[in-house]
Amino acid sequence: MLVTNVEISQYTYCERTERHTANVCMTLGDMFVTLFCALDIPANECPKTRAKAFVGDAMRQLRRMPEYRSGHKSIELSEQVDAPLPMLA
């Protein structure tokens, strides 16, 4: 499956837990998958690095789903999605 679009929403940073959280919605063909992602990276990390880390965590979660973990289907990002994401600026 090819991920053709990614949207990151509901971004928050918790000072107490020092954790970034967001919802990552991925478009795969005619299907939408929304994943809750949490990152343990420095509080002042640049927005582009945070966005790439959220996408990476979402891809990790997708690859653990049974349909992809079994190896019957593969999953990858399209070139447009792999470009720097403007979210979280």
Image (spheres, helix red, strand yellow):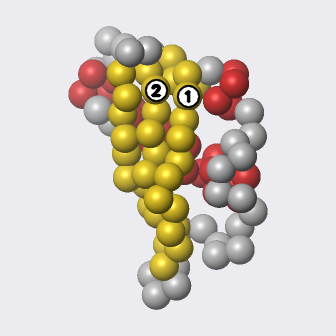
Which quadrant would the C terminus be assigned to in this image? bottom right
For the question of whether residue 88 can be seen, the reply is yes
Q: Position of residue 25 (x, y in %)?
A: 44, 39
**Residue 38 x %, y %:** 45, 61
Identified at 37% across, 45% down, the residue is 35
Q: Amino acid at mark 1?
A: Asn
Q: Is residue 69 left or right of residue 6?
A: left
Q: Helix or strand or loop: what does disc 1 sit on?
A: strand
Front residue of 87/36: it is 87
For mark 1, what is the residue? 5
* Callout 2 touching callout 1 (CB < 8 Å): yes
- Give amino acid for label 2: Thr
Specify few, some or many for label 2: CA neighbours under 10 Å numbering under 14, 14-19, or 20 or more: some
Quick one: label 2 or label 1, which is nearer the N terminus? 1
Residue depicted at x 53% and y 48%? 8
The one nearer the camera, 6 or 37, is 6
Q: Secondary structure at mark 2?
A: strand
Q: Give how far across and how far down residue 86 sits, in percent.
A: 72, 46
**Which dot marks residue 27?**
2
Residue beneath the point at 29% across and 32% down: 65
* Direction from residue 44 to residue 22 in the image, left or right: left
Farthest residue in the bottom direction? Answer: 16
Q: Is residue 57 visible?
A: no
How crowded pointer 1 is (Cα within 10 Å; few <14, some 14-19, many 20+) is rated as some
> Gap in Å between the C-alphas at discs 2 and 1?
5 Å
